[in-house]
Amino acid sequence: MNKRRLGLLTGTHAVNDLYQGLVPALLPFMVLERGYSYTAVSGLMLAATGLSSVVQPLFGLYADRHPRSWLVPTGFLVAALGLVLAGLSQSYLLTWIAMVLCGLGIAAYHPPATVAARAAGGASQKAMSVFSVGGTIGASFAPVLAATVVGGGGLSRSYLLGLPALAMGIVWMVANAGRGAASAAKAAAARQAGSHLLKPHNDWRAFSLLVATIVGWSIPYVTVLSMLSLRITRDLHGTSFQGAAALTGFTAAGAAGVLLGGWLGDRIGRMGTIRTGYLLALPSLAGLVLAPTAGWALACTGLLGMSMFLPFAAQVTLAQDYLPRNPATASGITLGLALSVGGLVSPLFGMLSDARGLGVTLTAVLGVLCVATVLALRMRNRTPQTIAPEAAAA
């Protein structure tokens, strides 16, 4: 494990996802200062997140065919530029275009950075979990940073939000000074040495099963995230503080689950970690559905957040091993397109909640999670050690 390289990449992940978190954090200030409607705000959110999820696999495909280390700093710098322009623009159209630019930067960063983090971490699942938590930490600071910078002086101070990206860009340049030529020479030597070796094949069937599993994970996750506070305050008659505490606890438990999943992955293996996470998530979500009090729901929420994120790092590395010829594409699909499905179908569950109540909706997503668990139990491991014999046999 190259700890120095992994630490640098984790820092860039924190900065990149900081801007991903700043997008929703700035929207309330735009409503107050510019009078945007809820429809207009939804359009900005779609421009930044929806398009980002769709094009992320394309950036992954490009990174596989043309590996470029500069995609990592370019991604978070472009994301910062787009966010700053969105804060300074007075026209809604220009703001929307700036949000698209921010989303494109976020999308360009993730595939090559995830592949680089896997290379820096070696065979360790803990390394990927540390890299993943870096993004969670960055996103968690977004509301505080937005309130500090914009809340004190209006959107005209949005240019200050670009400073973290500039600072990290300088750190990246200093840390990688002289590395470009060495990396290019090493890559050329590796290509020459391996020119006569048969490349391992992509297992698209196993990868499709993994994507279906992640889709079945993302729908309950997004639904619980959007309806958890209402479940506690309206259905269980909890206080507004308990509703906010549930959301905070769910997010914090998720970050702890990512780290715990990486630790478990190094000890019991990837598949054991993935299956444990899904099997623990089922009773946790069932407990939230059947919770008689807000306190009981809070306890189930913490366990649910931790268990749902236990498989996170293992699923990322497993996706890359399913597609050894296209690891960046695998990262783009699993981290972008598959995870965004939950957000795309969330309006349908919102309509179900309006018609039948939150309890029925949470019961429905519990059924979706049951399907995802069955799919997770059907998945099989694939490691670099098993890929090599497959290539030799072919």
Image (spheres, helix red, strand yellow):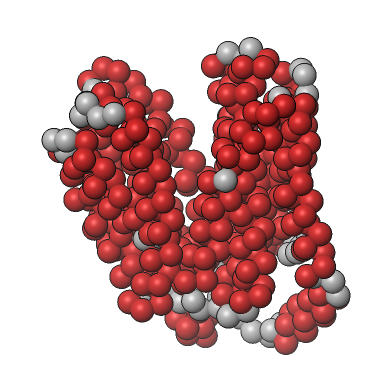
Q: Residue at x 31, y 56 (%)?
A: 307
- Tell me if 164 is positioned left or right of 265 in this view: right
Q: Can residue 368 be seen in this view?
A: yes
- Tell me if 196 is positioned left or right of 273 in this view: right
Q: Is residue 71 visible?
A: no
Q: Residue at x 37, y 43 (%)?
A: 221
Quarter residue 262 falls in = bottom left
Q: Residue at x 58, y 29 (%)?
A: 45
Q: Position of residue 198 (x, y in %)?
A: 61, 80
Q: In this view, does 21 lie above or below 120?
A: above
Q: Is residue 224 above or below residue 379?
A: above
Determine the residue located farthest toward the front in the rendered image.
Answer: 152
Q: Position of residue 353 (x, y in %)?
A: 29, 23
Q: Which of 158 and 79 is in front in this view?
A: 158
Q: In this view, does 70 lie above or below 236?
A: below
Q: Which of 214 and 242 is in front in this view?
A: 242
- Tell me if 341 is positioned left or right of 325 in this view: left
